[in-house]
Amino acid sequence: MSLTVANKITILRILAVPFFVATILDYSPERDYLRQVALAIFVFAVISDVIDGIIARVKNQRTPAGAILDPLADKLLLMSAFLTLYQVGNAFPVSRFPIWLVVAVISRDVLLLLGAVLTYVLKGRLTVEATKWGKACTFFESIAVIVMLCQWPITLFWYITMVFIGISGIDYLWNGMKQISNNQDEAR
């Protein structure tokens, strides 16, 4: 199996995560340029996510590998961003992520992963499809990271992001329960 262009872009996005994390962890107020470097890496990753999605749809390059790699890349980027930005947040002059938001981001993604594993164990296969609520959540999480990196004092995004974390988490839980119950109905 060869990798599609969309898969290669997704892998490039995954490879950007350690550079983003290293840049943030090396940040200090004396080296504020690192915040701009981290912002550029993050925006590159977000734009590449949009581009690989468009390419996968337009060129019909949807693959089983892409169905796993794309959400994995999103989770790695966003969880790393929230954790590292919280870690160095005190060094930022204007704002920092509240711990409840970081815990919500990580908890939702861990629960999604556990739900996917449970679904795979019970069904023997896994269908990974982003929902409109999941896409909206990813969008607002990304905007929250950009707001934080730009140091804009718009903490309203923390609350909006939290709302979408809750709605998308419930939506994925509902869809996962439907997948599992459909499997039990088929077994009867």
Image (cartoon, rainbow, N blue to C red):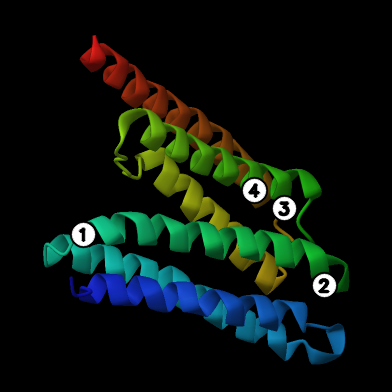
Q: Could you tell me which secondary element the residue under label 4 belongs to?
A: helix
**Percent x, y of residue 143:** 55, 60
Closer to the camera: disc 2 or disc 3?
2
Q: Which mark is residue 92?
A: 2
Is residue 45 in view? yes
> Who comes first in sequence, dot 2 or dot 4?
2
Q: Name the residue that disc number 4 marks.
A: 106
First reached walking from the N terminus: tag 1 or tag 4: 1
Q: Amino acid at mark 4?
A: Ile
Q: Position of residue 156 (x, y in %)?
A: 68, 48
Q: Is residue 156 visible?
A: no
Disc assigned to residue 63: 1
Tag 1 or tag 2, which sits nearer the N-term? Answer: 1
Quarter of the image for the C terminus: give it: top left
| Mark 1–mark 3 distance (CA, rounded to whole Å) | 38 Å
Nearer to the camera, 144 or 67: 67
- The CA span between labels 2 and 4 is 22 Å
Q: Label 1 near label 2: C-beta < 8 Å?
A: no
Q: Residue at x 31, y 15 (%)?
A: 184
Q: Position of residue 54 (x, y in %)?
A: 23, 65
Left or right: residue 188 versus residue 106 is left
Distance (Cα) linking label 3 and label 4: 19 Å
Q: Quadrant of the N terminus?
A: bottom left
State the separation of the CA atoms marked 1 and 4: 27 Å
